[in-house]
Amino acid sequence: MSCAIEFKRADHLHCVVEDHDWDFDSRRGVEIDAHWRERTSANPALYDGPVLLAHRAECAPAGEGGAAFSVKFFPTRFSRFVAWRDFGFPGSGVYNCFSMPALRSADGAFLLGEMGPRHSVPGAVYFPAGTPDPGDVRDGLVDLEANLFRELFEETGIGPEDVRLEPDWTVVLAGPRIACIRVAASAEPAAAIQARVAHYLAHQNEPELARVHMVRRRGQLAELRALDFIRSFLEPLLPE
């Protein structure tokens, strides 16, 4: 879907979990269950695990000129999320809010992953990411930085010790999607990163990614099946 894209800067995230009565789930449960049966028939690898979606998100000023982004998450299940996404994000006031590492090589290229055939969106291209789940909750708060590192490692084999996060978050508001992105700087050149991740994927039984792309120029974005907000984020950071 195409929608207006807005960027916010935040130096702090405050993410809580609370119960929420999601109208889409309560009213369309029969449709959702039927859709899930169709999806799992076509792709048995899909798993109806618990996930966290958001029902409120706002950016507010913080101390010393900073900004905090506050999110209220609620628990649901992956089947509900998939149906909501596949049905075109019906309703309002619910968001898929997630973190993403924009991994940048020492020579200025950014890593994008291409989702593999077992993924719920095979062929899609974006930064390593995953919808938060209860495993990302620490002391009652959703730790999106921990989620960022977990997804980066699970999808590419690159650990937190291999990158340096820039201090601020870029919060991308893209309709029902909210991407909380931080640039993750690597000391390795693009060719070394690509070879390293390819080796990692080749030795995984069920890799999430089919391959990775190291993007150096804006023109490459048009050749890839990248989401609109990914292109909007990267274009100012890349040369022609």
Image (cartoon, rainbow, N blue to C red):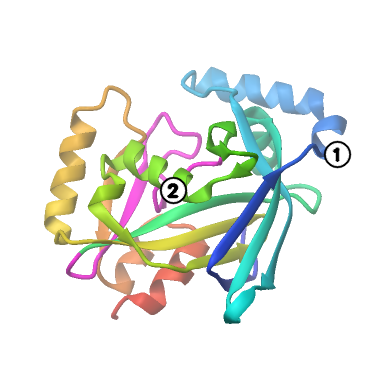
For the N terminus, give its image quadrant.
bottom right
Residue name at image x 59 percent, y 81 percent: 65
| Magenta-drawn stretch contains 239 | no
Residue 4 seen: yes
On the image, which quarter does residue 25 sit in?
A: top right
Residue name at image x 24 percent, y 69 percent: 216
Q: Residues within 10 Å of mark 1 (few under 14, many from 20)?
A: few
Q: Which residue is mark 1?
A: 23
Q: Which residues are magenta?
A: 106-132
Of the two numbered discs 1 and 2 in the rendering, the one whose residue sits closer to the viewer = 2
- Labels 1 and 2 touching (C-beta < 8 A): no
Residue 61 location in percent, x, y?
A: 67, 75
| Magenta-drawn stretch contains 112 | yes
- 20 left or right of 225 in image: right
Q: Which mark is residue 148?
A: 2
Residue 189 location in percent, x, y?
A: 14, 61
Residue name at image x 44 percent, y 48 percent: 148
Question: Is disc 2 placed on a helix, strand or loop?
Answer: helix
Q: Residues within 10 Å of mark 2 (few under 14, many from 20)?
A: many
Amino acid at circle 1: Asp
Amino acid at circle 2: Leu
Q: Up-down: is 112 above or below 172?
A: above
